[in-house]
Image (cartoon, coloured by chain):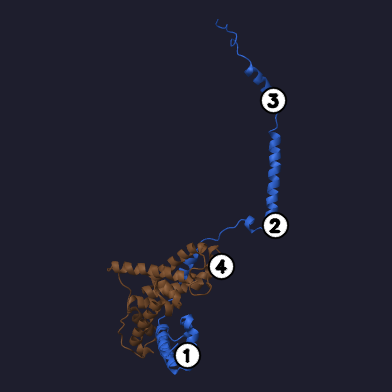
Chain colours: A brown, B blue
Amino acid sequence: MAGGDADPDGELVERVGRGDPAAVRALIARKLPRMVALAVRMLGDGAEAEDVAQEVFLRAWRQAPKWRPGAARFDTWMHRVAMNLCYDRLRRRREQPTAEPPEQVDPGAPPDRGLMALDVGRRVEAAVRALPDRQREAIVLCHYQELGNIEAADVLGISVEALESLLARGRRTLRSRLGDLR
Amino acid sequence: MNAERFRGLAEAWGGDLDRWPAAERDQARAFLAVSPDAAQALAEARGLDAALDAWRSPEASAALRERIIASAPAPRRRSPWVWASPWLRGAGLAAACAAGVMAGAALSGRAAPDPAGEALIAVATVFQGAPSPGVGLEPEES
């Protein structure tokens, strides 16, 4: 088992695989906020993020009856599916440059101590979005999704050492861009 | 664990030791207890963590939640047979076997030879075995 421990979702997924309605609702309550948050931070578009989250669950319903614990955690599997769906959408955006890109905030906005929390959030969002792709993905998975090093490295298909390097470089850049907020 | 490694971990994983790689957490806690530099590195990392937390993601809409619930497969219907206890299942199997034996016996009784029918078959066999008119009465060629 990646992560070293038993899958905390294992029993729930087994019940979902049997079609237990209470388990279905419990899995949605546990994972939907995480899937939406991941997709929003990857795509910057709420409607697209909801489509991704819905597709992740459609695949989860198909996967649950045949899920065999041991290889990976179900949460890690869901993250990998969500990330791949996000990659597909980002690739399509690049191939269709006429599509209207989601609204972005200028990462170079001057510091303002009187900014409301929402504005601070938008500045942070802009700073994270301005990072190179892999650094941004590492920070989204580890800081925001709170995946462990083994799970995040698994989702990104890299070693834990490479993941740590991405995180350190990304956070260093963010520290310099958001230094006035700390 | 040394100061350089501690700082490297803080720069990568932030100021919450619970988010650090599990394999190094205990060593990091022990080092933190004796190193002021480690405490400083952790405090700096916590500052960035707090800034990052200002970016909040929207909550999933109720409509999305309902769509996903509706997309879930229907509960699998299990027949009462599956729910029955092993004892009941055994009794059911025995009853089915007994019914099968009784039905077999009844059917074999119906298929018993009918004496009248047997007589007809015997007569037919005699006539089929008899030579047909003309056959065997032809004069043999000399």
Amino acid type at image mark 2:
Trp
Does the CB distance between marks 3 and 1 fall below 8 Å?
no
The picture places residue B41, in percent across and down from the top left corner, at 41, 90
The reply to whether label 2 and label 3 mark residues of one chain is: yes
Q: Between marks 2 and 4, how big is the CA–CA gap?
A: 30 Å
In the figure, residue B36 lies in which quadrant? bottom left
Q: Is residue B82 visible?
A: yes
Callout 2: chain? B
Q: Chain of mark 1?
A: B
Q: Position of residue A95 (x, y in %)?
A: 29, 66
What label does residue B31 carry, if any? 1
Question: Residue beneath label 3, please?
Answer: B118
- Which is closer to the viewer, label 3 or label 1? 1
Left/right placement of residue A135 relative to residue B115 reads left
Q: Residue at x 62, y 18 (%)?
A: B128
Please state if A171 lies on the left or on the right of B65 as rendered: left
Mark closer to the chain start, 3 or 1: 1
Residues under numbered marks 4 and 1 in contact, where contact means CB atoms less than 8 Å apart = no
The chain holding disc 3 is B
SS at badge 3: helix
Which residue in the protein does label 4 denote? A22
Q: Amino acid at mark 4?
A: Ala
Image quadrant where one finds the C terminus of chain B:
top right
Q: State the image coordinates of residue A128 (x, y, percent, origin top left).
A: 35, 80
Pointer 2 with pointer 1, Cβ within 8 A: no
Identity, as a three-letter code, of the amino acid under mark 1: Phe
**Camera-side residue: A1 or A134?**
A1
Distance Cα–Cα, label 2 vs label 1: 62 Å
